[in-house]
Image: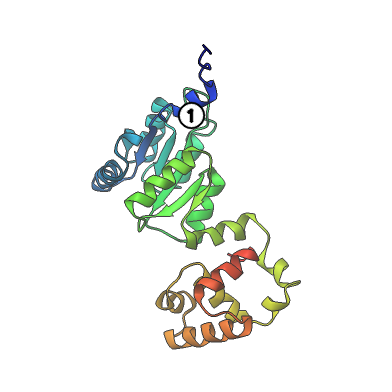
Amino acid sequence: MSQPSPPDPRSAARAQPRPPVRLVLVDDHRLVRAGVRAELADVAGDRLQVIGEAGAVEEAVAVVQRAKPDVVLLDVHLPGGEGRGGSDVLRGCAGLTTEDGRPVRFLALSVSDAAEDVIAVIRAGARGYVTKSISGRELAQAVVRVADGDAVFSPRLAGFVLDAFGAAAGEVAEVDEELDRLSAREREVMRLIARGYQYKEVAKELFISVKTVETHVSSVLRKLQLSSRHELTAWAVRRRLL
């Protein structure tokens, strides 16, 4: 009678449940922290474990250094420190690792989608940046991805990071015949629409009317031979214009 094969240790390892992601919440509004905690518990259960909270820079640095979490969910604007908000927390925790030697990772969560805020915290060491319009389920997924080492950004913010750290859009324009068909204003409108801005938001950003935005979008789609803003986004992503 043949003996049963010994269990494959790799299969056993894969069968082991993943430990919860240990999380610290940093926001200067206690109700926001309570809301985020409740929302994450509702959508992720015990897969995300909040082990600490803080509402100011100095408190946040102390809590993070003591708890050594997997991920810090970090607001951008915080009282205390040198007046740089979340960036001060990141500098105060530079090089910090978890108990098992992995880097403590930071995900910015803010109401602000201003380019200067995004770029400042990414330069200070944040692994991602999402806005507070994100759903609870999307936020839980973003936390897990950051814990795994991925970089995560709300779609409309990714362009700021590419502009600051990737190839300059102007360098692409010099060799892209399709992009050269667009006027300077059409390029501005195109980038904002591709990043997910609504027509009213584009109008406010560029100080033009909604009707003018509609005219520019129609012209962009016609010149590029595209039929929708979704195709426009894909076109811009392929060219690293976002």
Q: Which amino acid lies under the numbered mark 1 shown in the image of this protein? A: Arg
Q: Position of residue 235 (x, y in %)?
A: 60, 70
**Which image quadrant for residue 37?**
top left
Q: Position of residue 22 (x, y in %)?
A: 38, 32
Question: Could you tell me if residue 77 is visible in this image?
Answer: no
**Which image quadrant for residue 24?**
top left
Q: Position of residue 155 (x, y in %)?
A: 48, 60
User: Crowding at label 1, few (<14), some or many (≥20) Cα neighbours within 10 Å?
Assistant: few
* In the rendered image, the vertical position of residue 90 relative to residue 171, given as above or below: above
* In the rendered image, the vertical position of residue 18 relative to residue 30, given as above or below: above
Q: Quadrant of the C terminus?
A: bottom right
Question: Could you tell me if residue 206 is visible in this image?
Answer: yes
Q: Nearer the viewer, residue 227 or 204?
A: 227
* In the rendered image, the vertical position of residue 209 relative to residue 59, given as above or below: below
Q: Nearer the viewer, residue 117 or 82?
A: 117
* In the rendered image, the vertical position of residue 148 relative to residue 162, given as above or below: above
Residue at the extreme right of the image, as rendered = 175
Q: Position of residue 152 (x, y in %)?
A: 49, 50
Which residue appears at 28% of the width and 44% of the height? 33
Which residue appears at 44% of the width and 79% of the height? 203
SS type, badge 1: helix
**Which image quadrant for residue 107?**
top left
Which residue appears at 43% of the width and 41% of the height? 144
Residue linked to disc 1:
14
Which residue appears at 49% of the width and 77% of the height? 206
